[in-house]
Image: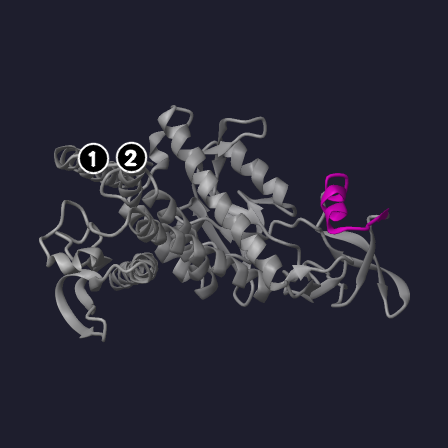
Amino acid sequence: MIDAFAQTAGTLLAFVTALAVIVTVHEYGHYIVGRWSGIRAEVFSVGFGPRLFSRRDRRGTLWQVAALPLGGYVRFLGDDNAASAGPGRAVDPALRRQTLQGAPLWARFATLLAGPVFNFVLSILVFAGFAIVQGLPVDEVRVGAVSEAPPAIVNDLQPGDRILALGGQPVATWRDIGALTETLPVAGQQDWQVERDGRRLTLTGPDPMPARIGGVAPRSAAADAGMRAGDVVLAIDGQPVTRFTQMREAVEAAEGRPLDLRLWRPGTGELDVTLSPKLSDLPADGGGFEQRWLIGVTGGESFFSPLTRSAGPLEALGLGVGQTWGIITSSLTGMWAMISGQIGTCNLGGAISIAESTGQAASAGGANFLWWIAVLSAAIGFLNLLPIPVLDGGHLMFYTYEAVRGRPPSDKALNLLTAIGMAAVLSLMIFGLTNDLFCP
């Protein structure tokens, strides 16, 4: 019971921390662009409910932390509520320009758009930071670092070795190694030809694609079983495993049946876990989706890593933009696939699944937690742009209507659409929570 309580508390703490970071960045986008646009903020709140502590700045904005850390808001001058919905409160006509309702259309549009944009910026900067810190492989196929391997695997490779051939076949790029893996015999050891200190050597080294775990998906069978990045699968149901493709084949053949895995973990040694693969919807190579049995792991590099170089700022930002755009497009594709019936609605998770995923990411280490925050930030930025009243996208939809027609929608229409939007958002939240509780 103590372990379960500690795990639940850790999950909640991680979830609240991630949510606070993402929401604060989102709301700060609204605040700062509103301020630049001449719109005055009365309150910037991290959390809802009773105020815990606060400070008023020289511009008159009250910065506060509230008791319920499940979001936050910016309330601009004249707003009726934290969502900046409705016609607004009456203010001194001399201050009308400083309200969201009385500001020019361009200022209102920029202020509302800034929240999701700041979420995307957070994601881009985090992903770019990872590219800078972790680096990118150099053009030459050189060994960077050598990692610990199970005792049965011999690894004579050393940092700085330039790889010339694998299994007797020449190697010019890292992609060549991946392609050659398909033709190599399945074995724990392979022959590597390298150049070291001007000499050509033939060494014994590990298979280029061992059953080594590179990543564990949150809320997956592997995560539930406690598997970690760096674990090596030695056997499945007593049958030896030496290559990642063997593990994939065993998982698919089980069709959901529980599997007994023998693992080796650096610094720990061998251990056993039991898990049951889950049926998942995945994009198919030819388009559309297909269902496959998965345990939720990705293959890692072999027991050595490429020699890396530092990524330049522009190069890193480009990679960050690409990864953020990939999250946005995959979210849009997945949403359309559920609406069109290509995949099951159980793919839509709610607050519980997000909290569990966040807790598992945090338990995997600070880097994984930061990466997950970036993923969530991009997803939340995308969701806020959906044209649903009460979301930023709904406000932007109204502003677009005003720009085209020359006048805003009537108060009656705004109130009706806002009520519909609120009902839609609440229904979506309830639907996601139901999936959390009842979907397998």
**Mark 1 / mark 2, whichever is N-terminal:** 2
Q: Which residue is mark 1?
A: 409
- The quarter in which the N terminus is drawn is bottom left
Of the residues shown, which amino acid type is indicated by label 2? Tyr
- Left or right: residue 224 versus residue 47 is right
How many residues crowd mark 1 within 10 Å: few (<14), some (14–19), many (20+)? some
- The quarter in which the C terminus is drawn is top left
Decide: is 379 above or below 76: above
Q: Residue lying farthest top?
A: 341
* Residue shown at 49% from the left, 45% from the top: 325
| Secondary element type, mark 2 | helix
Residue 345 drawn in magenta: no
Look at the image and give the residue range highlighted in magenta.
Answer: 169-184
Decide: is 393 above or below 16: above
| Secondary element type, mark 1 | loop
Residue 185 seen anywhere in this rendered image of the structure: no
Decide: is 348 above or below 64: above
Coloring basis for residues = one colour
